[in-house]
Amino acid sequence: MKTTHLLTTLIAATLPLIAVLAEDTAKPGRIEKAVPAYTGEELAKDAKLTLLEARAIALKAFPGKVIDQELEKEEGGSGLRYSFDIKNGSVTHEVGVDAKTGKLLENNEEGPHAGVFIPNLTF
């Protein structure tokens, strides 16, 4: 009888935690509780910011749902950056955050012509 009561209490106590972890975290400014693995994890030892800290900066710059994330060596800033693809409606931005300083390095729309200068060719 005591075992059943203990088990029931334990299950009841963990249900709110499970609900929080399963909750939709794509709301702007929201930091996810469980973060999937990302490309470049082996570089994390050189970063001063955690993935979650960089993610919060990126979501503040462009609110939406993170659909891809990586830590990479790339020119600009300290040379180590977190890169996030963030989708908001039909628009996806690539947002780059310096992994050592937290500085926003990039916030550009992605797509077939994003970031490409197309001149006005009217005559």
Image (cartoon, rainbow, N blue to C red):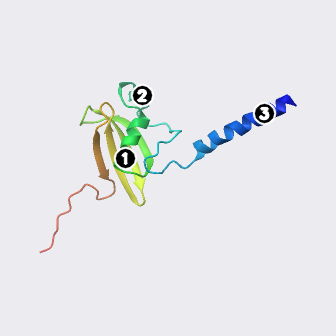
Tag 2's secondary structure?
helix
Q: Sequence order check: which comes first, mark 2 or mark 3? A: 3
Residue with the mark numbered 1: 60
The number of discs equals 3
Which residue lies at the image location 32% right of the left edge and 58% below the top edge? Answer: 112
Could you classify mark 2 by the number of other residues whose Cα lies within 10 Å: few (under 14), some (14-19), or many (20 or more)? few
Residue 114 in which image quadrant: bottom left
The residue type indicated by label 3 comes to Leu
Could you classify mark 1 by the number of other residues whose Cα lies within 10 Å: few (under 14), some (14-19), or many (20 or more)? few
Tag 3's secondary structure?
helix
Where's residue 54, x and y in %? 38, 38
Q: Are marks 2 and 3 in contact (CB under 8 Å)?
A: no
Which residue lies at the image location 49% right of the left edge and 36% below the top edge? Answer: 37
Q: Sequence order check: which comes first, mark 1 or mark 2? A: 2
Residue with the mark numbered 3: 7
Residue with the mark numbered 2: 42
The residue type indicated by label 1 comes to Lys
Instruction: Decide which of 30, 86 is in the foreground and name it.
Output: 30
- Separation (CA) of disc 2 from disc 3: 40 Å
Q: Residue 31 has which mark?
A: none
Where's residue 44, x and y in %? 40, 28
Q: Sequence order check: which comes first, mark 1 or mark 3? A: 3
